[in-house]
Amino acid sequence: MALLLSQDTAGDISSHGTAAVLSVVTGASYCPRTGAAGWAALCYGQRTSGRIPAVLTSSNQAELWAVVLGLQWVVSLGIPVALEEVVLHSESMWALQMIRSELRTPITNHSSGSRWQEPGTRDPSPTEKEALAILRSAGGMILSVGHRRGGWALQQCHSLSRQEMRRQREYIRMRGLLPDDNGV
């Protein structure tokens, strides 16, 4: 059973009985005009952000990649041996549903009154397949997903991911790949 963490404890390792659960909060920012996208994650008192290294066509894809890159970052930190479960949090119902469908994992809903946005019956795009393959390779971990709207942790992720997206968008403009659009 997944431990339900409040927004105040998001990003911490908590225990429920003898099982330790790690909560990772993620967020993404996407510019549809340039395709620039940034991601951020918050976990265990640490945070990180960066550009999304894939060609994206939607903010949903950006949110999916934010979850994937957030998990990769947490793994790179060295997950404690006693850890039983990793709960990946996102505000994107679509991304969470894609992950749930692919990994057959439960979804913990942290928002009252939220509605699922089904990813549909279409096959995942190559970009989505690549992200899901990375998640599948997280061997030995029990992954679950949790929907989260609002709260300090998510605001931090959005601020960091927006900065990364803006840096990438400026890089695209400076390289002359797009005409200046007056700061949009």
Image (cartoon, helix red, strand yellow):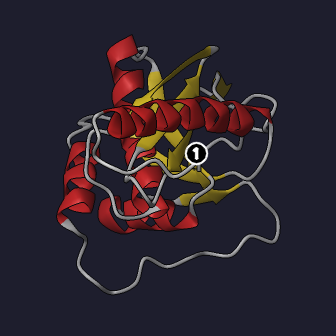
What residue is drawn where x is 65% and y is 41%? 3
120, above or below 171, in the image: below
27, above or below 152, in the image: below
Residue denoted by label 1? 89
What residue is drawn where x is 39% and y is 53%? 34
Question: Mark 1 is on which residue type?
Answer: His
The residue closer to the viewer here, 123 or 81, is 123
Residue 122 at x, y = what percent?
Answer: 28, 84
Q: Is residue 181 left or right of residue 73?
A: right
Q: Secondary structure at mark 1?
A: strand
The residue closer to the viewer here, 113 or 154, is 154
Residue 153 at x, y = what percent?
Answer: 71, 32
Label 1: few (<14), some (14–19) or many (≥20) C-alpha neighbours in 10 Å: many
Q: Is residue 172 left or right of residue 124?
A: right
123, above or below 93, in the image: below
The residue closer to the viewer here, 111 or 106, is 111
Q: Is residue 5 left or right of residue 171?
A: right
The picture quadrant where one finds residue 104 is bottom left
The picture quadrant where one finds residue 70 is top left
What residue is drawn where x is 79% and y is 33%? 152
What residue is drawn where x is 43% and y is 40%? 169
